[in-house]
Amino acid sequence: MIQRIAVLTSGGDAPGMNGAIRSVVRCAVSKGWTTFGVRNGYQGLIDGLFEPMGTREVGGILQRGGTVLGSARCEEFKTFEGREQAIRSLNRRGVDALVVIGGNGSQAGSFALSEMGFPVVGIASTIDNDLYGSDVTLGVDTALNIALEAIDRLKVTASSHQRAFIVEVMGRNCGYIALMSGLAGGAEAITLPEIDTDIEVLADTLRLAYEHGKSHAIIVAAEGAKYNAAALTEYFKTNRDRHGFSVRSTILGHVQRGGEPTAADRVLGSKFGLGAIEAIDRGEFGVLVGIQNNQITTTPFSEVIGKSKPLDEDLLRLARILD
Ligand code: ADP
């Protein structure tokens, strides 16, 4: 029977993680369980940085970005010995199950830990949206809205000067934020890691926009695309005659991670927290809690890790029609 659980946040922080922590703790309390918060991800697990967390400890955090537990990257956890040490820490505290809130790498860590026999449930949380087993991950809606706000602002200044702006957005090897923010921001072109960009076609699109008298052009570039901001800037520097605009480049970077979570991410984090506690209550371990077709789901780590999520073909088609 479950009596004690622990929760940690790992890898890149994502807006909404606090909502998930709050929900895990409060849903556990509703079952009569004790919860420990682990500081600084897997490093804190190895170092034994546990603190009891109750209903009051998670008050006032729902609207805050980042993670109140702190996050870290931990090379030691990738070793068998590191994970053995982590399991010793968990056992010393009498923890029956662990909830890991994090992205792709963190869930590979969850998988490795559960393969060693420790009961783990993961919560899909990363702004990269690159986790198989969840249509969207926690934090991506906030990051997307921050990117969109930046695009809208750049459009205003771009149109005053007949400029083209390259806006680079995050997402590692997943083009979700680029595709969605490009669509929502009315971008003239979008470059993605999953799709080969014909740079000559992209340049023609800009040229045409210029000749038709457009006052500005926006190119949204995914950081993981072959033509990211640096590569596009280089191309346009050496091919000035290929377009009429004066080109500027902005890399949004970690700004996208820093915002207060949107309503969608607060609610998603809360739902994921409940999903994790219900999975533990059912004795279902070694799974990732995600959302698929608007339902909270669990998917075995063995089906999640090592798989990449394909881009939505319909969205891609739409972006091509609308640019
Ligand atoms: P994210 O979870 O945001 O994708 P990382 O890829 O940096 O972040 O992973 C976070 C942490 O997860 C790593 O620092 C490491 O401690 C752990 N981790 C990643 N991959 C593995 C793995 N294959 N085995 C065990 N632990 C891993």
Image (spheres, rainbow, N blue to C red):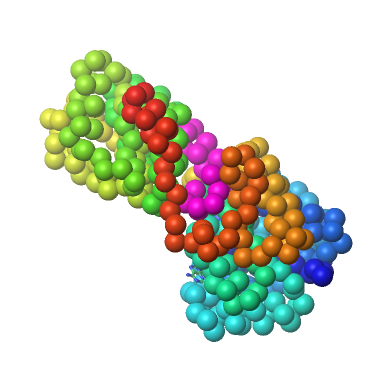
The image quadrant that residue 163 belongs to is: top left
Query: Foreground: 154 or 138?
Result: 138
| Residue 83 in view of the camera | yes
Query: Foreground: 101 or 275?
Result: 275
Question: Compared to 199, does 16 lie above or below?
Answer: below
Q: Left or right: 237 with respect to 156?
A: left
Name the residue rendered at 51%, 59% in the picture: 303
Name the residue rendered at 85%, 55% in the picture: 30
Name the residue rendered at 49%, 75% in the picture: 78
Q: Position of residue 209 (x, y in %)?
A: 25, 21
Query: Foreground: 304 or 186?
Result: 304
Name the residue rendered at 20%, 17% in the picture: 211
Outermost top residue = 213
Q: Left or right: 241 with respect to 39?
A: left
Q: Left or right: 144 with respect to 283?
A: left
Q: Position of residue 224 (x, y in %)?
A: 35, 50
Task: Please say whether residue 140 is one of the residues in the magenta stretch.
Answer: yes
Magenta stretch?
129-151
